[in-house]
Amino acid sequence: MITRRDFLKKSVTGIAALSLPLAAFEIIDPKKLMASEAADKAKVRWVFLVDTYQCVGCGLCVKACKLENEIPYESNVTRTWVERYVITNDGKFHADSPKGARDGFLTTKIDLGEGKTEDIRKEDIAKAFFVPKLCNQCENPPCVQVCPVGATYQTTDGVVLVDRTWCIGCGYCIMGCPYGVRFFHPVYHTAEKCNFCYHRITKGLKTACVEACPFGARRIGNIKDPDDPVTKIIMTQRVGILKEEYGTKPQVFYLGLDKEVR
Amino acid sequence: MKNHVLRPLFVVIGIGILLLVARSLYVPKDFGIGERGYMYGWHRLSNEEEWKNKIIKVKYRGREYCKDCHADKYDSINKSPHKIIMCENCHGPANDASGEHYSEQRPKLPIDRTRAQCLRCHYPLPYSTSGRAKIRSIDPDKHNPDTECAMCHNPHHPNLEGLR
Amino acid sequence: MLAHGEIWTIKELFVYPNEFIYWSVQIVMYPFMTGLVAGAFVLSSLYHVFGIKQLKDMARFALVFSFALLFVAPLPITLHLQYPFRAVNVLMTSHFTSAIAAFGIVFNTYFAIVASELWFLYRKRFVDISRELGKKQDKTLVEKIRYLLFTTLTLGAYDISEEALHRDEKAVKVLAGIGIPVACFLHGYAGFIFGSVKANALWMTPLMPVIFIMSAIVSGIALCMLTYIITMEIKKFLATRRNASRGVFRSKEEIIGVEVSVIKMTAKYLLFFLVFAISLELLDLIFRGYTAVKSWDVLRSVIYGRDFIDIFVLQYGIGNLVPLILFLIPGLTIRRAVLGVILVLFGVFMMRWNVVIGGQAFSLTFAGYMHYHMPIIPHDWNTFKEGLGGVLSIAIMPFILFWVIAKIFPVFAETPNELRS
């Protein structure tokens, strides 16, 4: 005859065992913990190529991105932007990105914030150029590492996405990104960033910014495809990456990356 | 009860069990470790499909999409230096938010005729070390400041040589 | 449509378009509150584990206050979230590579430890009240609720023999012992949240968790000292007024008020941890200046330029140096101790401010700055919860909670027999 105490003990143990979803054990499965196996087998790994020699700062890419990805047009946040760098003969550094270059650069005056500007004379300019920026879809994304709930993640083809239904809006991923590409979506209030127009590239289309750029300063490709023109350039020409000292292994490559670029 | 010292521990274990039960109800069934491992791939798996097809619809269609119905404009611009510009750069995306090209709410695409649009490329920025150097520019304060550029320059055929 | 953080951020020079001050004053409050929790607990454990007898009264007080603080500790970070109700996701689908997720588990463990320790300390009282009310035939509604509450709190363990109470004492010692490393973990994690962000040049240092723990203990001890002094003096004042005519006092605390020896002893521990904390912070600063890595130019302009007053005058000067002198001068009086602890608490708050806000004072470009002006007058929910309104609400809550909790876990002996010493 089972005692009440034993019965209670056994049923509690039984309920505990039943309620543990088997998914909880996945964390301990070593095969799942090792990612590199799956990444090596993937046939697609998206990479981006920016040619700063071609960029004229027209900002058509920023406008296209905002409209394609439904980022509120008037808001001061953007998935991609263009920076202007002007180095003067005295070695001084000037840079700005008014509204992320959504409207292009319609003045020679450098935007200093708080309504202040600085005018630079043509004779003083040593070099000046434009640098488009977007999410680097890093191979070691620090933003994904710091997400406490698993709302942001990386797909097998290398794109980092955000689950809007799960993001709690803590902002840790935004603080974790060394490149400043993340922000809070003004409408959805979840973390947001460039995702290489995932809804387009997975259908064989190009990203909106690549499509919009008239000068071929932006290009997207698949590094796993040796015949991809973008892959050929990355493999054979001298390309640079941003802030490589952080160890994030960014996958946006730059032709003509100057030492002054931040 | 001989030893009551473990009672708080039982309370804690009980709360833990309740939490696990709540978890099995609250967390979506397809939440787990993706192919990028636990560090980079911990997520709700169905979200990938949502981003591919549901959350955002394709809006920009690219230059070839406009060719069939708008052949005259397409051919005209293709013979000019503006052939590098995609139609939708001035006309907005071909498809609206729901992925439709034409709808009763939006019978015509907008046309950006502002000076600011043209000045994106044609504003005189003295940056000889960038691609800007190859584009002809005008001084917006001196060159017909109150008029739309399109009044004299046809964007699909911007050369003025024929007009002079 | 304003971006989040845009309303209280002013950008200067070259700043990335998406950069705003996302982690505002609530993220300053959060390590401050968890620090108070950890510090109060360590103070309480100094008696229970190391048997420092003079701290007995302070120990009980500190533990109950630590419990009240525990309820308030997760509030700042929950309020800060864009989706506070999704905060439970941190427990449900914890991503342990993130310091915030690990914090969820550590915090709940710590909560269990403090609650259990309190249970063992007050079990006899629960049993006494439950039995007393159980004997009563006609209970009023309030008494019925009290009976239900205290009976549940006994967890069915009614044995209050010497042996059982002795086992309670041992359990308290064990829990207090385990609790010290867990408290350190709790606050070390808060430091790790910042110290591990390689993208932020000011936060990224392995010293950050240790600095946070040391200053947490400092703040916890200081707050306990302050609240203890205030509470004891209030009790003395009320008792004197009440008993002036009758000339009868209920306990020795009512006559004496605060015992200077207790304060002096606690102040010694405060000083030790304060010196430790200051040393670590100065070490970090000196190291940065000496190695002068890429970020040093912009950091120097922030530390020695824009934030000079916040860092050197308010935090190091008024918040650290002045209380150090006040406590070192021989012949410590209660009044000087009160001033000292208030300044210490201010100093610890400024340290959190200078880390969180200071870390966002410069842009990721290292060529621009952001200025934070905290919303004082709120005009919507966002500017309330992330502004002065939110800070004040969080600041007064522990005291309100403490008053409520002290009714179940009283900290002062009402009669000599009621509480087991």
Image: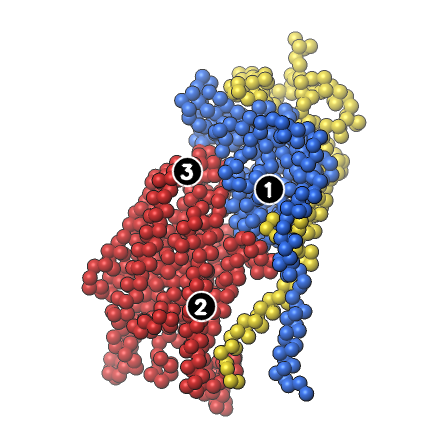
Chain colours: A blue, B yellow, C red
> Which label is found at residue C293?
3
- Report which residue position mark 2 lands on: C178
Mark found first going from the N terminus, 3 or 2: 2
Q: Which residue shows up at 69% across the image and 56% down it?
A: B30
**Marks 2 and 1 in Cβ contact (< 8 Å):** no
Above or below, comparing residue C171 to residue A248 in the picture: below
- Using a 10 Å C-alpha cutoff, classify the residue at mark 3 as few (fewer than 14 neighbours), some (14 to 19) or many (20 or more): few
**Image coordinates for residue C187, horizontal then vertical, percent:** 44, 58
Instruction: Name the foreground residue: C304 vs A156.
Output: A156
> Which label is found at residue A139?
1
Left or right relative to A57: residue A117? left
Q: Outermost residue toward the top?
A: B164
Q: Label 3 is placed on what type of residue? A: Val
The chain letter for the residue carrying disc 2 is C
Left or right relative to B119: residue C72? left
**Image coordinates for residue C24, horizontal then vertical, percent:** 46, 49
- Does residue A172 show up? yes
Q: Label 1 is placed on what type of residue? A: Glu
Instruction: Name the foreground residue: C57 vs A29.
Output: A29
Q: CA distance from mark 3 to mark 2?
A: 40 Å
Question: Helix or strand or loop: what does disc 2 sit on?
Answer: helix
Question: Helix or strand or loop: what does disc 3 sit on?
Answer: loop
Q: Which residue shows up at 38% across the image and 62% down it?
A: C39
Above or below, comparing residue B71 to residue C236 in the picture: above
Question: Helix or strand or loop: what does disc 1 sit on?
Answer: loop
**Image coordinates for residue C34, horizontal then vertical, percent:** 43, 60
Above or below, comparing residue C310 to residue B135 in the picture: below
**Image coordinates for residue C54, horizontal then vertical, percent:** 29, 72
Q: Label 2 is placed on what type of residue? A: Ile
- Using a 10 Å C-alpha cutoff, classify the residue at mark 1 as few (fewer than 14 neighbours), some (14 to 19) or many (20 or more): some
- Does residue C395 show up? no
